[in-house]
Image (spheres, grey):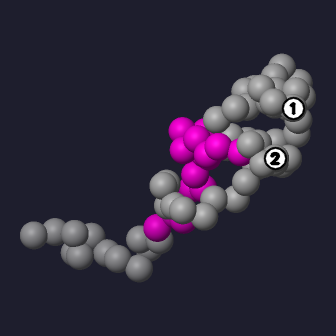
Amino acid sequence: MLFRKKVDKCCACCARSGQSGNGGLICSKKGFVSPDDSCRRFRYDPLKRNPSRSAVKDFSQFTEEDFSL
């Protein structure tokens, strides 16, 4: 859910963090941090969330006749 109340706190989804060149993050409060860190100043940014991919649908059980009118 995009705007859920209980969010896992991590610097990768924080509004105060930004990408650095070496794969880490730069926090405006703590400096260089890893994406798994968190602090009490965490503020959730829904635009930084990477949603998981949905499962691929299996249509092999259907035939061409199922899709014709």
For residue 42, side relative to residue 60 (left or right): right
- Residue closest to the eye, 19 or 52: 19
Residue 3 is covered by the magenta coloring: no
> Magenta region's main secondary structure?
loop
Q: What residue occupies the far front of the structure in this picture?
A: 40
Residue type (three-letter) at the residue carrying disc 2: Cys
Estimate the x, y position of residue 13 in percent, counting from the top left: 67, 43
* Chain part drawn in magenta: 42-57
Give the numbered dot on residue 60.
none
Determine whether the residue tagged by mark 1 lies in a helix, strand or loop. Answer: loop
Read off the residue under disc 1.
30
Determine whether the residue tagged by mark 2 lies in a helix, strand or loop. Answer: loop
Q: Residue at x 61, y 46 (%)?
A: 44
Estimate the x, y position of residue 5 in percent, counting from the top left: 54, 62
Residue 52 is covered by the magenta coloring: yes
Q: Residue at x 49, y 54 (%)?
A: 2
Report, in whole angstroms, how far the alpha carbon at label 2 lies from the one at label 1.
9 Å
* CB-based contact (under 8 Å), mark 2 and mark 1: yes
For residue 14, side relative to residue 32 (left or right): left
Mark 1, Cα crowd under 10 Å, few <14 / some 14-19 / many 20+, is few
For residue 34, side relative to residue 69 (left or right): right
Read off the residue under disc 2.
39
Mark 2, Cα crowd under 10 Å, few <14 / some 14-19 / many 20+, is few
